[in-house]
Image (cartoon, rainbow, N blue to C red):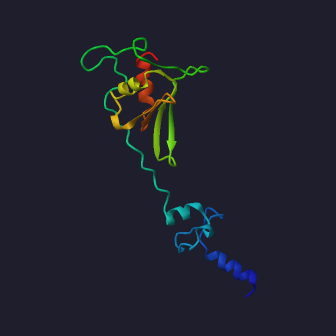
Amino acid sequence: MSLLQRTLQASARIPYQPSLRLPRLQNLSPSPCPALTNSRRYRGEILGSRPTPIKPKTILVGDPTATVKPDGTAIQTKESLPYLVKRTSKSGWLPVYREFKHGKTQTLTIIRRVDGNVKQLADDLRQFVPFDRIEIKELQRHVVLKGDYLFAVRDWLTARGF
């Protein structure tokens, strides 16, 4: 039997595969070295996937968009508050930023460009952010919140006229 006949006979026994580049690997034993496997999908199924990071749950205590306090009095606007959060000069955005630390497993919300009493701003933020998640950086004039409070803080500042 010639080599050509043996090749044709062997190819007739192989079932149809939609992809010629990536052969089916379901019945094969896993390779000891992941770099020797033929497809990235196969490597992920056998060796597992990357674990999802544990994100701290964002806890809102109150309503950041409320215009009236629970006791019925109106909230203070920026003219009567002892602090001022300046908007950015070029685009006019609020200086509230989200920052990721430790391989994107820790989320921080940073309020920058605070003029005046930073401690009073932190006290007012305690209306909807738990006390243990607020950190004050007085030298930088920043307030750091542990957790993703970006939209809640923006809404809260906008409701007060900043």
Number of numbered markers: 0
Residue at the spot x=52%, y=24% of the render?
Answer: 113
Quick one: 138 or 96, which is closer to the camera?
138
Residue at the spot x=40%, y=15% of the render?
Answer: 81
Q: Is residue 4 shown left or right of residue 132?
A: right
Q: Is residue 106 shown left or right of residue 10?
A: left
Compared to residue 159, the image places residue 31 above or below, namely: below
Residue at the spot x=60%, y=65% of the render?
Answer: 17
Q: Give coordinates of residue 95: x percent, y percent.
A: 52, 26
Q: Give coordinates of residue 152: x percent, y percent.
A: 41, 29
Which residue extends farthest left?
71
Q: Give coordinates of residue 114: x percent, y percent.
A: 49, 23
Q: Is residue 132 shown left or right of residue 161?
A: left
Quick one: 137 or 108, which is closer to the camera?
137
Compared to residue 146, the image places residue 37 above or below, namely: below
Which residue extends farthest top?
79
Compared to residue 46, the image places residue 95 above or below, namely: above
Residue at the spot x=42%, y=46% of the render?
Answer: 55
| Quadrant including the N terminus | bottom right
Q: Is residue 16 shown left or right of residue 49?
A: right
Quick one: 153 or 51, which is closer to the camera?
153
Which residue extends farthest front?
139
Write down the quadrant of residue 41 in the picture: bottom right
Quick one: 42 or 120, which is closer to the camera?
120
Q: Give coordinates of residue 9: x percent, y percent.
A: 67, 80
